[in-house]
Amino acid sequence: MNVSLRSTRLLLLGSLAIAGFAQAQAGPVVNIGERHGNLRAAQEHIVQAYQFVSQAQSANDAHLGGHAGRAKELLNQADAELRAAANVANERGW
C-alpha cells in the first residue's frame, strides 16, 4: 500500500471518529412531533435525563467512573430508537 493511500485512509478514519465524537457530545434532541405524543413525551424525558446526568458530571468534576458518560451514550441510543419508531409509524401511516 502506498503512502498516499494509507494517509487518505487514516484521514478518513480520523474524520469519522471526530464526527462520531461530536455527535455523541451533542446529546439527544426532541424531534418527534405531537402526532406521536407518547414517543415525544418519552423523548422529552430522555433529553431531561441527559441534562441531569450532565449536571451530575459537573457537580462531581466528572469523577463518576465513566458510568455517567456511558449513561449519556445509552440515552443518545434511546433517543435515536424513539426517532426510528416514529419514522416506522409514519411510513405505515399510523
Image (spheres, rainbow, N blue to C red):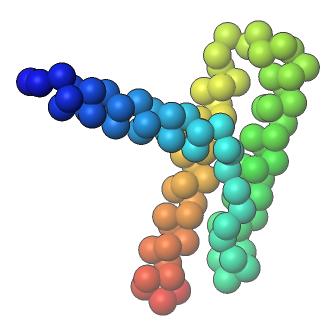
State the residue at coordinates (81%, 40%): 51
Q: Which x, y percent locates residue 37?
A: 72, 75
Q: Point out residue 34 in the picture as x, y percentages from the top left corner.
A: 73, 79
Q: Inspect this view and state whether residue 42 appears.
A: no
Residue at image point 70% right, 24% down? 68
Rendered image quadrant of residue 6: top left
The quadrant in which residue 83 appears is bottom right
Q: Residue furthest right?
A: 59
**Quarter of the rendering occupied by the N terminus:** top left
Q: 74 above or below 93? A: above
Residue 29 location, x and y as percent?
70, 56
Tell which of 57 and 42 is nearer to you: 57
Query: Going by the image, does 25 lie left or right of 87?
Result: right
Residue 31, by quadrant, is: bottom right
Residue visible at 34% across and 37% down?
Answer: 12
Q: Nearer the viewer, residue 75 or 6?
A: 6
Task: Let me know if residue 43 appears in the view.
Answer: yes
Q: Residue at x 87, y 30 (%)?
A: 55
* Total tally of numbered discs in the picture: 0
Hey, which residue is sitting farthest left in the picture?
Answer: 1
Q: Nearer the viewer, residue 28 or 19?
A: 19
Observer-nearest residue: 81 or 21? 21
